[in-house]
């Protein structure tokens, strides 16, 4: 039964099977059930602009809504990436000057003189033109003398640069007005941290407070977002920011929703789980055993998203919105799974790094302890390289799983090589050698 608050026209549309068409007062164009653009067989990839802000006006087509939704959330991610991006800094040194009458450093505004590079190039051009003299800051000058003088200044400048005498001259990227305003606001005491992009959450972890904190309470955003797995947090963050119309019409709540009216961040659930539940629910409803799919003499093919069989045309016509909704949430689950996979890989990498660090520490401790023992082939390898400079028994390369290195490896936690056969004559790495023992295990 159609909702009792629908007018006669909307009730007729609902009774015909188009359950998700917005009410007449929210439709920007007359309802056209046979319009192929009304609900396409999939979700088009071409976005049709409908305005800015949180989403354009609803035109009656699901493609407009989904296009606006994905553009809005993508633009938000770009803004957050820019908001959190470290400003670029790079060294900058003024060029060599012909004189430094006011002393070093070079290139300050009060600096006198001219560009030595320019002087050299001018003199070289004059010489190539067959001239013996040129006009310089010192008056009429021999071109060879001018080139030599300029070259001396250039080489002197290079030496000063190489030895650090010019000092750290750094240029910092000038932030935009928007960046300056945001940095000021988020730098105030008792203000929340900057909102993070989805990729930033994946890499660094969520920096907000569980439950939303005091600002979450004031904004009515108290939820368990801060306690969710990082992959789910990233997925939800990636889908926030759209407050435009949904298939039900205008979004008067001003909360972030997807085009089918589901809150992307909610106090009552996890959007990352909800998209998967929608796929399961819709997939079953469209199947032969489902309430909708069982009505037709046709079978729903989940691979193509279409019904096949004697009544396929009727089934596809009657289920356009359901199939579009399934298509949308299938795409959402793909992104969710990608974020979860990225988070799982991050955790594996962190565990591997921790294990490697622990393994290296254990190996160093074992070598140091075993080095105290007298030469034993099963411990120190097939070749007795004698003792290292600390008086500890050395190891041969095959004792550490690296094949025979051709020299002994010092023990005692130092790691330097010892001379072949004698066990002496070289210095441990930690006492002036070339590398740390840790490098042997990399």
Image: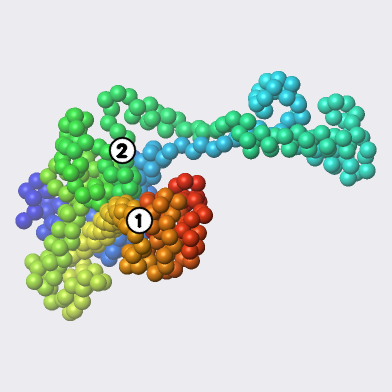
When asked about the image quadrant of residue 244, the answer is: top left
* In front: label 1 or label 2: 1
When asked about the image quadrant of residue 225, the answer is: top left
Q: Quadrant of the C terminus?
A: bottom left
Q: Quadrant of the N terminus?
A: bottom left
Image location of residue 376, percent across then percent down = 34, 65
Image location of residue 3, percent across then percent down = 8, 50
Residue at left offset 27%, top offset 48%: 234
Badge 2, how many Cα within 10 Å: few under 14, some, many 20+? some
Dot label at residue 97: none
Q: Which residue is under mark 2?
A: 195
Q: Secondary structure at mark 1?
A: loop
Q: Is residue 30 visible?
A: no
216 is higher (above) or lower (below) than 385: above
* The one of 101 and 247 positioned closer to us in this rendering: 101
126 is higher (above) or lower (below) than 438: above
Badge 1, how many Cα within 10 Å: few under 14, some, many 20+? many
Marks 1,2: beta carbons within 8 A: no
In the displayed image of the protein, which residue is found farthest to the bottom?
310
Image location of residue 77, percent across then percent down = 35, 45
Image location of residue 257, percent across then percent down = 22, 46
Left or right: where 122 falls relative to 173: right
Left or right: where 82 falls relative to 163: left
Residue at left offset 65%, top offset 26%: 105
Dot label at residue 371: 1
The disc, 1 or 2, on the residue closer to the chain's N-terminal end is 2
280 is higher (above) or lower (below) than 245: below
Q: Secondary structure at mark 2?
A: loop
Residue at left offset 27%, top offset 65%: 41
* The one of 306 and 282 positioned closer to us in this rendering: 282
């Amino acid at each position: 039964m159609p909702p009792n608050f629908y007018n006669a026209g909307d009730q007729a549309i609902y009774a015909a099977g188009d359950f998700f068409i917005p009410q007449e007062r929210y439709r920007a164009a007359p309802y056209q059930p046979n319009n192929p653009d009304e609900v396409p067989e999939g979700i088009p990839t071409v976005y049709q602009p409908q305005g800015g802000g949180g989403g354009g006006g609803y035109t009656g087509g699901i493609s407009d809504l989904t296009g606006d939704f994905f553009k809005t959330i993508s633009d938000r991610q770009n803004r957050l990436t820019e908001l959190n991006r470290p400003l670029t800094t790079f060294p900058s040194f003024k060029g060599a000057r012909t004189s430094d009458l006011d002393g070093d450093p070079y290139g300050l505004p009060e600096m006198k003189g001219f560009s030595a590079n320019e002087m050299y190039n001018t003199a070289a051009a004059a010489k190539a033109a067959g001239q013996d003299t040129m006009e310089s800051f010192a008056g009429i000058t021999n071109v060879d003398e001018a080139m030599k003088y300029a070259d001396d200044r250039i080489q002197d400048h290079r030496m000063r640069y190489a030895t650090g005498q010019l000092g750290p001259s750094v240029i910092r990227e000038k932030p935009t007005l928007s960046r300056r305003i945001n940095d000021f606001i988020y730098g105030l005491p008792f203000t929340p941290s900057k909102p993070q992009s989805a990729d930033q959450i994946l890499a660094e972890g969520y920096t907000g407070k569980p439950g939303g904190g005091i600002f979450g309470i004031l904004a009515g955003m108290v939820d368990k977002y801060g306690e969710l797995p990082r992959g789910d947090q990233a997925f939800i963050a990636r889908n926030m920011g759209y407050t435009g119309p949904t298939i039900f019409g205008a979004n008067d709540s001003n909360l972030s929703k997807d085009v089918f009216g589901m809150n992307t961040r909610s106090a009552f659930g996890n959007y990352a789980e909800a998209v998967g539940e929608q796929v399961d629910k819709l997939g079953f409803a469209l199947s032969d055993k489902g309430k909708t799919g069982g009505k037709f003499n046709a079978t729903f093919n989940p691979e193509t998203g279409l019904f096949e069989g004697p009544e396929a045309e009727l089934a596809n016509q009657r289920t356009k919105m359901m199939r579009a909704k399934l298509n949308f949430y299938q795409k959402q689950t793909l992104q969710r799974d990608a974020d979860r996979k990225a988070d799982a890989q991050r955790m594996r990498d962190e565990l591997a790094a921790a294990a490697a660090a622990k393994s290296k520490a254990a190996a160093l401790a074992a070598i140091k302890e075993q080095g105290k023992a007298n030469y034993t082939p099963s411990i120190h390898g097939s070749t007795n390289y004698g003792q290292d400079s600390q008086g500890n028994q050395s190891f041969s390369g095959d004792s550490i799983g690296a094949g025979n290195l051709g020299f002994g490896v010092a023990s005692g936690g130092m790691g330097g090589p010892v001379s072949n056969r004698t066990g002496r004559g070289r210095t441990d790495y930690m006492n002036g050698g070339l590398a740390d023992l840790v490098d042997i295990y990399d």
